[in-house]
Image (cartoon, rainbow, N blue to C red):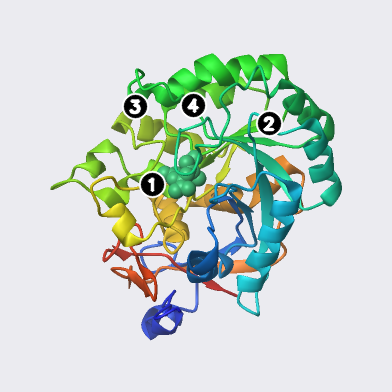
Amino acid sequence: MIKSLAFPPQVKLSPAKSEVPCQVNARGAKMELTLTRPDDWHLHLRDGDLLQAVISHSANHFGRAVVMPNLKPPITTTAAAVAYRESILKALPSITEFTPLMTLYLTDTTSPEEIKLARKSGVVFAVKLYPAGATTNSQDGVTDLFGKCLPVLEEMMEQKMPLLVHGEVTDTNIDVFDREKVFIDTVLRPLIQKLPQLKVVMEHITTKDAVDFVESCAEGTVAATVTPQHLLLNRNSLFQGGLQPHNYCLPVLKREIHRQAIVSAVTSGSKRYFLGTDSAPHERRRKECPCGCAGIYNAPVALSLYAKIFEEAGALDKLEAFTSFNGPDFYGLPRNASKIKLSRTRWKVPELFSFGFGDIVPMFAGETLEWLPSAI
Ligand SMILES: NC(=O)N[C@@H](CC(=O)O)C(=O)O
Ligand SMILES: [Zn+2]
Ligand SMILES: [Zn+2]
C-alpha cells in the first residue's frame, strides 16, 4: 500500500518564479526550458509493490522507457515480456502517455526461434546482455557469448533487434574499476567486428575508454546511454564522510577524469549518446545493510540533474537532443509529440519515499535542486 507519493511537488512552485512572463531573468539566465517529452532508454521498473510504488516517477515526465528484464525470475521469453508489459500498463496512473518498451534477458539457452517470436510479437523492443554475475539479478545471464549465443546474435542482426549491453567482465581477478575497459577490449570490439550490422547500445557508460570506443564505431550502429550519477559523481562520492550505499551502483562510479570525459561527450552535441537513467530502486533495508545491493533510485531527480549537468557545462542548448531526440533517432522511432517544462525553481528532494512494504531513498535525498519538471 502506498503511504505517500506526493511528488513531484508541482503544487509548491513558488508563484514569483512560476509567473515570470519571459524565459530569461534580468541576468540573462534561462528561467524555463521547454523540451520535447524525453524518453528513458534504460529503466528498472521491478514488479509487484515496487513497480506500483515507482512507476509514476517515470511516467509523469517520460514518454517511453526501455524496461529492463532483470526480474526474479528474469524475463527470458516473449510470453513473459508480454505479461510483464500488461502488469506495467495496469500499474500506470490512469492519465498517462507512458509507453513501456520491453526487453528480453539473454541467456546461454535463448534460441534463435525466441528472437523470431519476439520480433513477431511487436512487444519486444530489444535484447539485454548481462554477463552472468555482473550486476543485480544477473545470475542467469550469459557465460559464453561467442560460443552458445552466436546463433542468437546472428538472428538478432537479421531481425534488426538491438542488443543492449551491461558492459563489464565478471572475472573477480580483474579490478572492479577496470571491468568496463576489459569488457570493451575482450568482448565488445570483437563482437562488432564479427557482427558489424548488429545494433548495439552500451548501457550506462562510465569511462573515457567507453567514450573512445563509442566514438570509434559506426554512428547509427553503436550508441551509449548515460546516467545522471555517472555524469555528476566520481568514486569519491562512495566514501564521502563514510560509506555511502545510496551512491553505489554498477558499473561502479569511476575517477574524475572519466566523469569529465563522459560530460564532454554528452554535451558535445554528438548523436551517439542518449538519456538512460538506470533508475534502479531497492528497498532501503537492502541498500543499508552488510551487503548492500547495487542500484541508485534516480527517477524522481533525473531530469533536474541532467539539466544541471548541461547547464554547468554551458550546453543547455544541447540538452533536448540528449533527452528527447538522439534516442528515438537511433532506434528509428518518432520523437514524442508532447512537451514538458523545466522551471528554474528550487525544490527539495524528499529524504525518502515511504510505502507499506518499506522505504526507498532517492539519489540526492534531502538536497536542494533547481530545474523542476512539469507537464505542459
Ligand atoms: N545499475 C545497478 O547498479 N543495478 C541495476 C542493474 C544494472 O543496471 O546493472 C539493478 O537492477 O539494480
Ligand atoms: Zn547494468
Ligand atoms: Zn540498469
> In front of the other: label 3 or label 4?
3
For the residue pair 340 and 295, the one nearer the viewer reads as 295
Q: Quadrant of residue 36?
A: bottom right
Q: Is residue 346 visible?
A: no
User: Which percent across, then down, holds residue 185?
Assistant: 51, 15
What is the distance, in whole Å, between disc 3 and disc 4 at their CAs?
A: 13 Å
Residue corresponding to mark 2: 109
User: The disc labelled 4 sits on which kind of residue?
Assistant: Ala
**Element under label 1?**
helix
The yes-or-no answer for disc 2 within 8 Å of ligand 2 is no
Residue corresponding to mark 1: 229
Contact (CB < 8 A) between labels 4 and 1? no
User: The disc labelled 1 sits on which kind of residue?
Assistant: Gln
- From the viewer's perspective, is residue 43 above or below residue 168? below
Picture residue at 70% right of the left edge, 15% below the top: 194
Residue corresponding to mark 3: 177
Q: Earlier in the sequence, mark 1 or mark 3?
A: 3
Residue corresponding to mark 4: 210
What is the distance, in whole Å, between disc 3 and disc 2 at their CAs?
A: 30 Å
What is the distance, in whole Å, between disc 1 and disc 2 at their CAs?
A: 34 Å
For the residue pair 267 and 6, the one nearer the viewer reads as 6
What is the distance, in whole Å, between disc 1 and disc 3 at their CAs?
A: 16 Å
